[in-house]
Image (tube, rainbow, N blue to C red):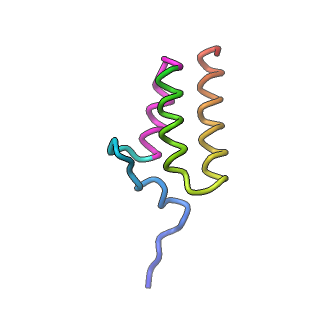
Amino acid sequence: AYTKPATTTYARKTDEHGLTLDDYVDNINMEEDIEVIKTYFTRWLALCVSEKQKDFFTSVKDKRKKQLGL
């Protein structure tokens, strides 16, 4: 039986806003309001199922903050 790679299962899990973690990555990378980024990040953490994911998303958020000069 074929099993999908475990590394991509997070991308299809949606939250109560109908967004996946991939959606949040895209949103943060386009967002310019730090308060909105913080909101997205908080929602993200609720979707994360491992420390590795949390570390990845933290790096995405920090990289975006740096791009914005924050």
> In which quarter of the view is residue 67 placed?
top right
Which residues are the magenta region? 21-34
x, y percent for residue 69: 64, 14
Lateral position of residue 24 relative to residue 59, left or right: left
Lateral position of residue 44 relative to residue 15, left or right: right
Image point 65% across, 37% down: which residue? Answer: 59
| Residue 23 falls inside the magenta stretch | yes
x, y percent for residue 51: 66, 53
From what the image shows, is residue 38 above or below residue 69? Answer: below
Image point 50% across, 20% down: which residue? Answer: 35
Dominant secondary structure (helix, strand or loop) of the stretch shown in magenta:
helix
The quadrant of the rendering that contains the N terminus is bottom left
Q: Residue furthest top?
A: 69
Q: How many labels sit on residues?
A: 0
Q: Residue furthest bottom?
A: 1
The quadrant of the rendering that contains the C terminus is top right
From what the image shows, is residue 21 above or below residue 70? Answer: below
Residue 4 vs residue 58, the one in the foreground = 58
| Residue 27 falls inside the magenta stretch | yes
x, y percent for residue 62: 65, 29
Image point 46% across, 26% down: which residue? Answer: 30
x, y percent for residue 27: 44, 32
